[in-house]
Image (spheres, rainbow, N blue to C red):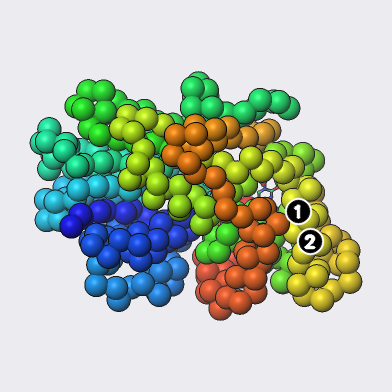
Amino acid sequence: MKKILITGGAGFIGSHVVRRMVQKYPNYQIVNLDALTYAGNLENIADIEHEPNYTFVKGDIVDADFISALFRTHQFDGVIHLAAESHVDRSITDPLAFVKTNVIGTMNLLNAAKEIWKGNFEGKRFYHISTDEVYGTLGATGLFTETTPYDPNSPYSASKASSDHFVRAYGETYGLPYVITNCSNNYGPNHFPEKLIPLLINNILQNKPLPVYGDGKYTRDWLFVKDHAVAIDLVFHEGKNHETYNIGGFNEWQNIDLVRLLCRKMDSKLNQTEGTAEQLITFVKDRPGHDLRYAIDATKINRELGWKPSVTFEEGLEQTIDWYLQNKTWLENVTSGSYQKYYEKQYQ
Ligand code: NAD
Ligand code: TYD
């Protein structure tokens, strides 16, 4: 029996991780801690909420006393930490919110783990989920490896870099057994429609403009979220302490090419004439400090742990579009209310 805390399990990636862990490990007790911010949604994990090895706790990782008490009550053996403010555009308008959750929240979890484990680290593990954005931007060539120096450019990536450094520092200073993974852009079911791919799907369904920042020549490396969840499970169980693993799909796309591909797929799914969705493409003001290119070298996790993506981008995108078409109520629910206000502020 192991007791595992997963933070941020009502969010996009966290919900896939929680489902996988609850279903695959019936002998684990999984506690999902989430503050249910705009990005957290219990609908994402409604299918597993009654499983006997699953508990949901609503709470904020910024609240140190609450976190300390939670760890004392549950005596966790492991932590898989995904809770974060995760949207670059929001970090540009409200950087402090990112420092609070991503840096202070992570510190609170580290302190609570250190407090209950008391230097007895046998069978214990603190797994911090991070991003490739901590490495900054690439030019036209090259890939991020685990030894690429950190060079964050946005308040989001700076806050994630800071939290990564604290996790490492707790490993060096107090011997805390940690692993960190830095993953590329994820896509898939349950992705909040402020991020590029679900925003495009939603806008095509609504016949609204498809906003492309700048000239659209920015490049991202896309990974299907369920493949990320598989990698997280693997690293949690088989990764080496005090190590970092990069996770990515060797799947680079310039934004404009990705937008056009998605438009073609949506036309076909919606039985529209080819070219209908593309007419909605609108070039808009660029994001300040926009990183030109991210691309991950995922050789280490493949070589050492045998992980590789299970689906091609075409297959993953098909599954993603189908999920959104079959879950229009989910989309309507998350895009009502405060989403409309955010959207008007960001794109007007
Ligand atoms: P998300 O924004 O969809 O979900 C974040 C979750 O954390 C939400 O459920 C939210 O309610 C919760 N949360 C936020 N602040 C909290 C707080 N103070 N206390 C408790 N819970 C809080 O994010 P995501 O895309 O699922 O990302 C999860 C993790 O993976 C993040 O750490 C992110 O940096 C990292 N990551 C994301 C991507 C990506 O492409 N989405 C890529 C690499 C790494
Ligand atoms: P996003 O999904 O926000 O992820 P990240 O910034 O973490 O990579 O954006 C992916 C890319 O798409 C990024 O280059 C910014 C761009 N983008 C647009 O062109 N238009 C949009 O409306 C959004 C949200 C993003």
Instruction: Please provide percent x and percent y for residue 218.
Output: 72, 38
Residue 21's quadrant in the figure?
Answer: bottom left
213 and 129: which is toward the camera: 129
- Secondary element under disc 1, as helix, strand or loop, is helix
Residue 260 screen position, x and y as percent: 80, 54
When the figure is inspected, residue 170 is found, relative to residue 15, above or below; the finding is above
Q: For this view, does 44 lie left or right of residue 252?
A: left
Image check: 271 left or right of 143? right
Could you classify mark 2 by the number of other residues whose Cα lies within 10 Å: few (under 14), some (14-19), or many (20 or more)? many
According to the picture, the residue beneath numbered tag 1 turns out to be 259
User: Residue, x 59% and y 65% (percent of image)?
Assistant: 340
For the N terminus, the quadrant is bottom left
Q: Mark 1 and mark 2 in contact? Answer it, CB < 8 Å.
A: yes
Q: Nearer the viewer, residue 324 or 122?
A: 122
What residue is shown at x 77% (from left), y 64% (from top)?
265
Q: Is residue 163 above or below residue 85?
A: above
Q: Please identify the quarter of the rendering in which residue 106 is found.
A: top left
Q: Quadrant of residue 270?
A: bottom right
Type of amino acid at the residue the image marks with label 2: Cys
Q: Which residue is mark 2?
A: 263
Residue 213: image location, x then y, percent: 72, 45
| Gap between marks 1 and 2 measured at Cα | 6 Å
Q: Is mark 1 within 8 Å of ligand 2?
A: yes
Residue in view at x 73 percent, y 27 percent: 140
